[in-house]
Amino acid sequence: MTYLSDFDWNHIRAFLTTAETGSLSAAARQLGQTQPTLSRQIAALEADLGVMLFERVGRSLEITQAGVELLDHTRTMGEAANRISLAASGQAQSIEGSVRITASDVMAAYILPDLLREIRTQAPRLRIDVIASNDIRDLMRREADIAIRHVRPDQPDLIAKLVQEASGHFYATTEYLNRAGRPTCKGELSQHEFISFGDTAQMIAYLKPLCINLSDENFRLGSQNGIVAWEYAKQGFGIAPMSQVVGDATPGVERVIPEMEPITFPIWLTTHRELHTSRRIRLVFDLLAAFLSK
């Protein structure tokens, strides 16, 4: 049996760069190779795998389903190789400039600090600006270099990587639950006060397929700002959904109906195609991918 680790890294890199740039010519320019050389490397990888990774559609090159399935694995290898290269050469210490990360206010305040410490250790001359926002247009307007979002962007000029299927739960303070009672099933949740994060109607619609039937009457308090809404929950105003990472680490609050299945949501890491030509964006993107995948 042949394993991916047995293959020529040059062949894997040729496939990965072609898939992410979208064309042989762009990939060849980035790698400093000729198109025929790149084509031979991809053909060699296809022969080793016994599958077709790309097919011609008119004048464009389209990745096949087999190629899509391989892509995430080769991206992981590429990220690891890049980190090894930077560490071995000491380049990370010399990288400077600014990288702007946009993330939700909750992510920016409660989850990113540990990652920012790691970036400061590896690249102390790098400046990180964090934009706390839920708007993907920050990336499209070039107001940010990397976005962390819960939905995959559909803009063709962006590179998106699914880094985690995260879990969340309902939380409330022990004081609130002692006062209002601890629900034992989803049906009893409609008897409680909830804190709204953003659009109340959207929250109600999102929870309904989960057999959690709430109405406007359940939401007497809320905020568009996630940190503010979570603070209201911490102050005992009612029940709020929150990421498991944040909720479990918050003193004074506990899971509501602990045995209830978690609410799952994706975490997408998104950036411009300049990822391939910017060492500082590449470094931060790879560190974010590794950190958020844990």
Image (cartoon, grey):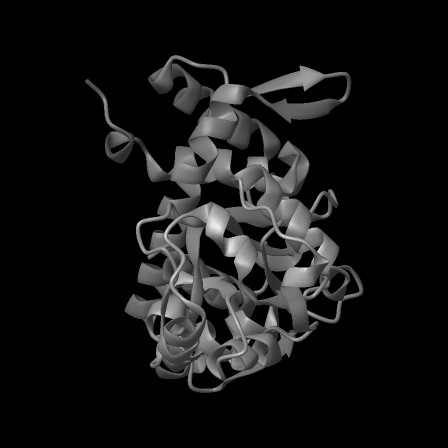
The quadrant of the rendering that contains the C terminus is: bottom left
Q: Is residue 221 left or right of residue 90?
A: right
Residue 7: image quadrant is top left
The foreground one among 77 and 262 is 262
Image spot of residue 155 (x, y percent): 74, 45
Q: Residue furthest top?
A: 50
Q: Residue furthest right?
A: 141
Residue 152 in view, yes or no: no
Establish if 191 lies above or below 67. below
The foreground one among 278 and 64 is 64
Residue shown at 58%/38% (left/top)? 209
Residue shown at 44%/70% (left/top)? 172
The foreground one among 48 and 171 is 171
Establish if 187 lies above or below 194. above
Image spot of residue 72 (x, y percent): 44, 39
Establish if 22 lies above or below 269. above
Residue shown at 32%/56% (left/top)? 258
